[in-house]
Image (cartoon, rainbow, N blue to C red):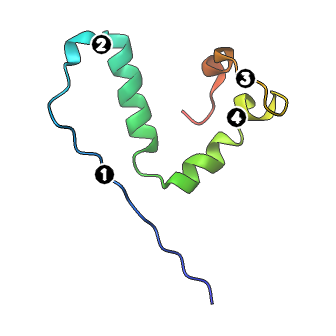
Amino acid sequence: MWFSIEEYEFIIPLEKPTMGIFSQEEINSIEKVLNTFSHLTSEEITQCSYKEEAWTKPKNKEIISYKYAKDLTCI
């Protein structure tokens, strides 16, 4: 018999973040990521990442270049 048990871990900050350290572009990026992934499980996010060139193009153990960031399809 197969059971699926999902565990959730919530991180509660000790203090409010200092948002002034972020540019508007950075805040927009954070919001885009949150809006895209907040409703997905970790497994769904993992499966999505496996379709990205950042995962499929580099050879085994090769460092993943930031150049792939501009071509992300999941976001």
The three-letter amino acid code for the residue at tag 4 is Glu
Q: Label 2 is placed on what type of residue? A: Phe
Tell me which numbered mark, 3 or 2, is placed earlier along the sequence.
2
Which sits earlier in the primary sequence, circle 1 or circle 4? 1
- The residue under label 3 is 63
**Residue type, numbered disc 3:** Ile
Q: Earlier along the polypeptide chain: callout 3 or callout 4?
A: 4
Residue positioned 17% across, 37% down in the render: 14
Q: Sequence order check: which comes first, mark 2 or mark 4? A: 2
User: Residue 57 placed where, x, y %?
Assistant: 81, 28
Q: The residue under label 1 is which amino acid type? A: Phe
Of badges 1 and 4, the one in the foreground is: 1
Please identify the quarter of the rendering in which residue 29 is found: top left
Q: Residue 22 bears which disc, if any?
A: 2
Return the residue at label 4: 52
- How far across and down, in percent of the image, does residue 71 sit? 66, 22
Kindly identify which residue carries mark 1.
10
- Give the residue furthest to the bottom: 1
Residue nearer the viewer, 5 or 63: 63
Q: Position of residue 48 (x, y in %)?
A: 63, 45
Identify the secondary structure beneath mark 3.
loop
* Closer to the eye: label 3 or 2: 3
Residue 20 drawn above or below residue 6: above
Q: Residue at x 36, y 20 (%)?
A: 28
Please, is residue 46 above or below residue 5 in the view? Answer: above
Give the Cα distance between marks 2 and 1.
Answer: 23 Å
